Amino acid sequence: MPRSETSFADLGLRPVLIHALNRIGIDIPFDIQTAAIPDALAGQDILGRAPTGSGKTFAFGLPMLQRLSGASSRPRSPRGLILVPTRELALQIERALEEPALALGVRVMGIVGGVPMKRQSERLMRGVDVVVATPGRLEDLIQHAAVSLADIAITVVDEADRMADLGFLPQVRKLVDRTPKGGQRMLFSATLDGDVDDLVQRYFDSPAIHSAEPPALAQATMKHLFFRVADTDKNSIALRIASRTGRTMIFLRTKHAADRFTASLREVGVSALALHGDKSQANRTRTLAAFADGSVTVLVATDVAARGLHVDGITLVVHVDPPADAKDYTHRAGRTARAGETGTVVTLVTDSQQSHVAALAAEAGILAEFTDVTASSPALAESTGAQAPPGSPVVEVIPTVRQSGPAREVDRRRRPVPRRTRDKPGRSGRR
């Protein structure tokens, strides 16, 4: 995303906060930060039209931390609330704000499902200034009297369009209704129409509106390849692509398919893990830690990971199952070629899927030119680095993360993965 020539000091941030940003290698603000931070520091309501990867976390997070610093929150009564649609995004924001918050003496806590409620209740009782929460778990804690929103001074709704897509807006409205009227409110979303606009009309008072240009999928740093494949060849082609050298992210439509394909990869020697909504929070945290540090080179995911997930160095995104629409294509593709890096996006397409994929690519601003490939095609190897799988079952790296907050200490144990993995019965169609 574009960066401004303005400095963080010019925006009104305190020196201690700027030094904290410098320690983590951040010294020049993105455009959305330059636009939104001064208004947010002044306490004004903010509407930000900004996609994932635009720098919006610091656009709302840094002003919130600075405005809340210098005072302490009562037990179970945070003063800052950030609502997000997914566990991964909540934990990512918590990690991003950790160093700036520490510099200002502000306590930030992620509230997500998959973590014992008792542990979360105990931490809230000790006092937390900002909670980064998914709506469902926050509502559960409120029902158990473990947290109150009566002291909330600043509320942020992040990725509001995704909240709408997932049906979370009724919960969001109930939660915002619990916060005091007159508090500062900020909303960030890729779009500001439909149900998102209804939320704006209900809760925002003369907001300042700031926009960041969405990442251009046709940019020179991102290459888009569309391979027409036979149904019978699709799996073997995907296996060869995943056997390449480099960090790779692979998307499938269902949880069951993601688990099956991951097992297939490990059987032929490819270090891979799956990420989807049926995984426990501990498993998801360990999986992302292993992918981020390079212990695992392939992440196989459903669309739960298409938004809000940022791992540096993903050089290839593969749609084994084509996305449902242009919006999903954009978010999946956005996992690569971030912050000026280069990357490739590959879509495997059967004859019956070609017209659908051509239409969604056109809507996303991409001209889809289809190339016929087989597992042995030179074009496949030349464009993706596809190669024959290693052959021997992988010795799986299982990171064990001991944490009370964001992922930190990572231990590793090794155990062989059996050659044959029996599919578990369950609801295979849910993402």
Image: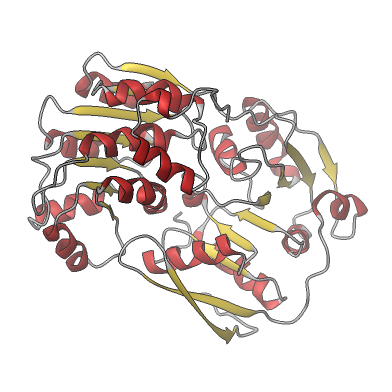
The percent coordinates of residue 139 (x first, y second) are: 18, 50
The percent coordinates of residue 87 (x first, y second) are: 37, 53
Q: Please name the colour scheme applied to the rendered image.
A: secondary structure
In this rendering, does residue 191 appear at all?
no
The percent coordinates of residue 255 (x first, y second) are: 50, 60
Image position of 217 (left or right of 59): right
Which of the pair 21/129 is nearer the observer? 21
Quick one: quadrant of the N terminus?
top right
Image quadrant where residue 157 sits: top left
The percent coordinates of residue 233 (x first, y second) are: 79, 59
What residue is shown at x 31% (from left), y 51% (from top)? 102
Q: How many marks?
A: 0
What residue is shown at x 67% (from left), y 58% (from top)? 247
Image position of 130 (left or right of 389): left
Q: Is residue 275 above or below residue 371?
A: below
Image position of 329 (left or right of 94): right
Farthest top residue in view: 206
Farthest right residue in view: 378
Image quadrant where residue 330 sits: top right
In this rendering, does residue 34 appear at all?
yes
Image position of 91 (left or right of 372): left
Q: Is residue 193 above or below residue 415?
A: above
Which of the pair 263/294 is nearer the observer? 294
What residue is shown at x 57% (from left), y 64% (from top)? 293
Q: Is residue 334 above or below residue 266?
A: above
What residue is shown at x 51% (from left), y 29% (from top)? 30
